[in-house]
Image (spheres, rainbow, N blue to C red):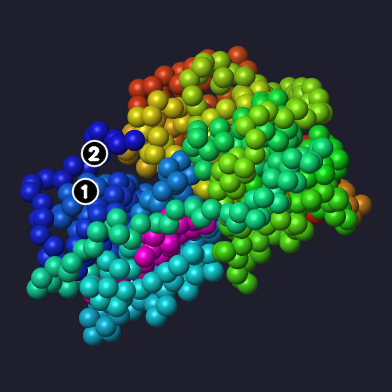
Amino acid sequence: MTRNWKAEPVEGPVDESIAWGSDVPAAMLRRLGIKHIALTPGASYRGFHDSLVNHLGNDAPEIIMCTHEEHAIAVAHGYAKVTGRAMAVAVHSNVGLMHASMAIFNAFCDRVPMLILGATGPMDAAERRPWIDWLHTAQDQAALVRAFLKWDDQPGSVAAIPEAMLRGWKIANTAPCGPVYVNLDAGDQETPLAAPPALPDPARFAPLPEAAPNPAAIEQAVKALQTATHPVILFGRGARTTEAMQARVALAERTGAALLSDLKSGAMVPTDHPYHVGQPFNRVHGAGKAVLERADVILSLGWIDLGGLFKQVFGAGTSKAMVLHAGLDHQLHSGWGQEHFALPPVDIDLNCSADAAVAGLLANLPDETAPAPDIPAPKSKSETAPGITLRDMATALRDAVGDRPVTFPALARGWPVDLWPHHHPLDFLGKDGGGGVGSGPGLCIGAALALHGSGRLVIGTLGDGDTLMSVNALWTAAKYRLPVMFLINNNRSYMNDELHQERVALARGRNPANAWIGQRLDDPAPDFAGLARAQGIEAFGPIDTSDALADVLKQAVKVLDSGRPCLVDVLTDGRLGREDAAVRDTKGAA
């Protein structure tokens, strides 16, 4: 949605002529239809920054200023999770790229598109300022992050910039998507132009549409699904559109398959659909294990870590079911990282995106509803604790927002999806991709930017450790008046790691009572509300009773309705909702 006001309007007339080298990449961003560029200022792209302001008038794209490069990337990541489209980011020289690296890794692992513009040099040593320009020049700057980029380039002249940006845009937004990096020479940016270069029409260099699956493979898959007695569909990565979700539901109902959802992928199908088994998960629950053990056909639609799921269910053995898989993730696998996960057995590989596979299967299946699967009854859930639980938090929040649509860019570990099912593809945007702690605030801000004016409330339930690591990202939400609620699940610990320490101690016959040492965020306890207020965010807390929480959340929703961000700090018991984490083996899920 387009915001109808600017935080920083430009004074005076803008220079609409393309007169300097840096005007070229700025003009290309506008031609590509990019609305926003997140950045943390840096002198290596001072020419480009001037072009954004004094050539484009800080409009199309509008600058979204961030206080750290990691936040800038996370904002673009959250934006892409909503829109499915790349946002631009500017990153300062080598040092800014180092700051940004973890967030780029998250975006790469989450397979989201992003156009990152860097800067270095001047590459001509004769043009460098003493000391600082030498420090901030690298011969191959992209090497810092190339292992988790989809593509990179450093154009050798101003004339080469349009092609580099067009290629990067096309690559980033073509499935499987990923971040790309175009590094601009500081010397080229500050070169006066005798005449502007030709700027091509981006429509002729558009991202590729999704390729259709092989008809023979689809025919085999249809036959397997039609003859299956206990089919299961695993829903992983896919498009966040109502049309795509409706198509997935139609496929389930035509095949009579039991449905399982990956918490990492977000809302792909309604989680309270009669065919859906249990809650979305990271580590498979008992009901999910049961349906997979009896399955005779398993269809994986973009499932993340299929081999790992099979290991959880079948141990050292393998599934006897016929395995069908759709996904393009293999096209990005390389030797540096291990995000390809364990190699699963696949009998029919459709070698296309999950949504292309759904379309191909529906086109070849009879338009009739198959008998419903036998779904294990969900176990009743209850939590008792002297303080606030996540179920208390979810209940109070649901009461505060009523029937209004909510987008959760992030959900705290153990969030009770059974109390608040996912019905719309934007209800939950999934996890951060690479497990890089500190991404939550930026992801929430990016989602709020993308959803501004949509009518959806944007609420992130964040861990206290994740928030504390990137708490200065909140300034951007205040600066641009983005209505987003940061709801802090404050257990005053790096609780996930505390539980890991407990598991290790138990496995070694040592004292688990010491698991808190070097883990607790207490004595002194961080003042999250104070940290938020210091950046212009209205804040509440810490809240330690359910009665107070119910009242505060109603006030917080009113803040969102006024068009402003807010933070609510809620003290909880972090051990609740962790699926008996303390008794898992030392190699259990994170």
Q: Which of 212 and 268 lies nearest the eye of the viewer?
A: 212
Q: Is residue 67 magenta?
A: no
Q: Amino acid at mark 2?
A: Lys
* Residue 324 visible in this rendered orientation of the protein: yes
Horizontal and vertical percent position of residue 523? 63, 40
Q: Is 469 rendered above or below residue 6?
A: below
- The kind of residue tagged 1 is Asn
Residue 466 percent location from the top left of the image: 57, 45
Badge 1 is on which residue?
58
On the question of residue 539 being in view, the answer is: no
Q: 158 and 518: which one is in front?
A: 158
Is 226 displayed left or right of 37 in the figure? right
Q: Quadrant of the N terminus?
A: top left
In the image: residue 445, left or right of residue 228: left
Looking at the rendering, the stretch of residues picked out in magenta corresponds to 167-188
Q: Position of residue 182 (x, y in %)?
A: 36, 67
Q: Earlier in the sequence, mark 2 or mark 1?
A: 2
Q: Decide whether residue 175 is among the magenta residues.
A: yes
